[in-house]
Amino acid sequence: MADRDGLHAQIRQAVHQLITRICAHNHVVAQRLRLGGTDSHILALLTVHGSLTPGRLAGFTGLSTGAVTGVIDRLERAQMVRRDHNPADRRSMHVTSTPAATARIAVEYTDWINVLNTALQHRNPVELATIAHFLTDLTDSDSPLNHPDHSQTTSPGQDRV
């Protein structure tokens, strides 16, 4: 069995490779959908989180609310999102991915989902629980990775993924 430091290095390397492949795939998807990278990122956030306010989108991306409004305008013209008034506060809007956009994105990620499903089918319940806990730790809302300025959470010389 590999030592702890060796396993840590192996995991960091695998996560780095996964991130690189996901970024490359996201770029291809954006091109296929004729979107810019930021537009594609906003659309992905809406697909994952559902309806969000422009302010929440700004918080997720680190963009100004004005920049987010420009992205929403482009996506709305492309019929990929819609704006709805917040029933609790008519001054605020919610932005939602259209069903057509959601379907187009799902098609683009079918191969990734199939690979994931195949990999998970080979794991026992204990391994699945460990994987789920690990990924939850990385994506938990309190994780520094969920804040646009997360690059400042590491010190010079400290490992980054």
Image (cartoon, grey):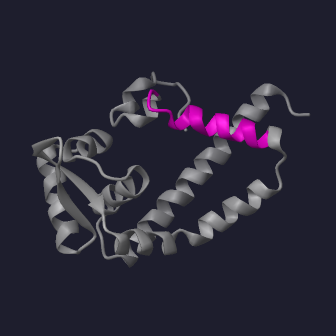
The image position of residue 123, as x and y in percent, is 82, 49
Q: Quadrant of the C terminus?
A: top right
Q: Is residue 152 above or below residue 85?
A: above
The image position of residue 40, as x and y in percent, is 34, 62
Looking at the picture, tell me which residue is in the foreground, 4 or 43.
Answer: 43
* Image: magenta residue range: 127-142
Q: Is residue 159 above or below residue 40?
A: above
Residue 108 highlighted magenta (yes or no): no
The image position of residue 34, as x and y in percent, is 31, 76
Q: Residue furthest left?
A: 91
Q: Residue furthest front?
A: 87
Looking at the picture, tell me which residue is in the foreground, 12 or 49.
Answer: 49
Looking at the picture, tell me which residue is in the foreground, 77 or 149.
Answer: 77
Looking at the picture, tell me which residue is in the foreground, 70 or 95.
Answer: 95
Whether residue 150 sits left or right of residue 95 in the image: it is right
Dominant SS in magenta:
helix
Q: Residue furthest top?
A: 155
Who's the residue at 58% across and 36% down the image?
Answer: 136
Q: Quadrant location of residue 21?
A: bottom right
Whether residue 46 sits left or right of residue 18 in the image: it is left
Q: Quadrant of the N terminus?
A: top right
Whether residue 131 sits left or right of residue 104 in the image: it is right
Query: Total label count?
Result: 0
Who's the residue at 62% across and 64% down the image?
Answer: 113
Residue 130 highlighted magenta (yes or no): yes
Who's the residue at 41% across and 36% down the image?
Answer: 146
The image position of residue 154, as x and y in percent, is 45, 25
